[in-house]
Image (tube, rainbow, N blue to C red):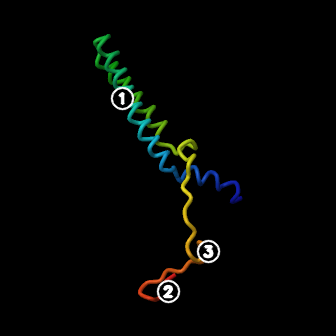
């Protein structure tokens, strides 16, 4: 059962790498600027503020759908973390003031 739930858990935890964070930031900026510009131009041409607001709102919702979920393309370059000095992640010991804590 764990084999079936592990991919779902990974998806909903929302893990993205550093390159994915940069990509999400660039995408959100570009998509919001494009939707605002298109909304402004359409609203100016038709002289209708409602067109501007609806197009900008649709662009914001589209940007949220693209950027907020942890899509797999945001985690293509995961970081390789170092293994603790003990060799095992679960069996490592923490020493505080010469006393082993964990």
Foreground disc of the pair 3, 1: 3
State which quarter of the image contains the N terminus: bottom right
Nearer mark to the viewer, of 2 and 3: 3
The residue at the far bottom in this view is: 98
Q: Quarter-wise, where is residue 37 in the image?
A: top left
Tell me what residue is drawn at x 44 percent, y 34 percent: 63
Q: Is residue 53 above or below residue 21?
A: above
Nearer to us in this view, 44 or 17: 17
Residue at image mark 3: 87
Say which label, 2 or 3, has the lower sequence index: 3
Distance (Cα) linking label 3 and label 1: 49 Å
Query: Which mark is on residue 33?
Result: 1
Q: Position of residue 22 (x, y in %)?
A: 44, 44
Please, what secondary structure does the residue beneath circle 1 have? helix
Give the residue pinned by disc 2. 100
Relative vertical location of residue 45 with respect to residue 9 in this rendering, above or below:
above
Instruction: State left or right for residue 56 relative to residue 7.
Output: left
Q: Position of residue 68 (x, y in %)?
A: 46, 42
Which dot marks residue 70? none
């Amino acid at each position: 059962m764990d084999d079936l739930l592990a991919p779902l858990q990974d998806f909903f935890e929302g893990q993205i790498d550093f390159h994915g964070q940069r990509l999400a930031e660039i995408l959100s900026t570009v998509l919001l600027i494009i939707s605002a510009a298109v909304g402004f131009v359409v609203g100016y041409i038709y002289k209708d503020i409602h067109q501007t607001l609806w197009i900008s709102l649709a662009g914001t919702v589209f940007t949220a759908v693209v950027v907020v979920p942890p899509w797999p393309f945001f985690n293509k370059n995961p970081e390789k973390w170092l293994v603790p000095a003990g060799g095992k992640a679960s069996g490592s010991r923490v020493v505080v003031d010469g006393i082993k804590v964990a």
